[in-house]
Amino acid sequence: MRIDIITVVPDLLKSPFEASILKRAIEKGMVEIHLHNLRDYTTSSYNQIDDYQYGGGAGMVMMVEPIDKCISKLKSERTYDEVIYLTPDGDVLNQGMANSLSLQGNMIMLCGHYKGVDQRVRDMFITKEISIGDYVLSGGELAAAVLCDSIIRLIPGVLGNETSALTDAFQDNLLSPPIYTRPAEYKGHEVPKILLSGHQRKIDDWRDEKALQRTKDRRPDLLED
Ligand code: 6GU
């Protein structure tokens, strides 16, 4: 998988890929991340990437031409399965979307800024619009990092057995059950006896029950469909 991220703040996207699981996935050659500074694709002499809105109104709009130049150059070099625009008015990311995107080949991610992009960018190039939740970030970069993390950890071989994605929260539309490690008792707080019993079927039943209870208590919406 190759992910090309178009941004006006490439610095914001450096560190997420320089540590831990994402770094290892890149080093193992399972994913390539390429950052593109939109300012490298301007035509005007003072590197303009945004302009005033037609019709008036506060806030600048990202211009179509630099984005066209960047996306068109990338597309002339290889094929892409998705061109994703990160925007608060996109479809809200969930585990199902991450699962299906983890099966894709190459992707472009465009990070929005200011008021967003000229509608013609969306009409001409974008295949998916994704938000990471109902709150506003100052730009799409952190959302792109979240999206990349959610996708890359699902690529087969990226996670070892000890952190298998198969038992993640949300994988069956359920939250995770409570988990414990040593010691068995800490300041009077004990690990549930069942987990120390060695009786695997009963342990699995207990976990299923706790996961369901936690989901009913905290996220009943997940159980609706
Ligand atoms: Cl993708 N972008 C911005 N700017 N804010 C967001 C977001 C994206 N998702 C949630 N809030």
Image (cartoon, rainbow, N blue to C red):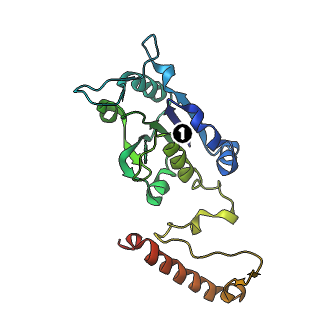
Q: Residue 52's quadrant in the figure? A: top left
Question: In the image, is 133 to the left or to the right of 53?
Answer: right
Instruction: Decide: is 52 above or below 196.
Output: above
* Picture coordinates of residue 217, whole percent (x, y): 45, 77
* Picture coordinates of residue 61, whole percent (x, y): 35, 29
Q: Taking the image as four quarters, which one is ligand 1 found in?
A: top left
Q: Specify few, some or many for label 1: CA neighbours under 10 Å numbering under 14, 14-19, or 20 or more.
A: many
Instruction: Decide: is 20 above or below 40.
Output: below
| Residue occupying image coordinates x 45% and y 44% | 137
Instruction: Decide: is 172 above or below 148.
Output: below
Q: Is mark 1 within 8 Å of ligand 1?
A: no
Is the C terminus in the top left, top right, bottom left or bottom right quadrant?
Answer: bottom left
Label 1, on which residue? Answer: 3
In this view of the protein, which residue sits in the foreground, 217 or 94?
A: 217
Q: Residue 223's quadrant in the figure? A: bottom left
The answer to whether residue 105 is seen in the rendering is: no
The answer to whether residue 136 is seen in the rendering is: yes
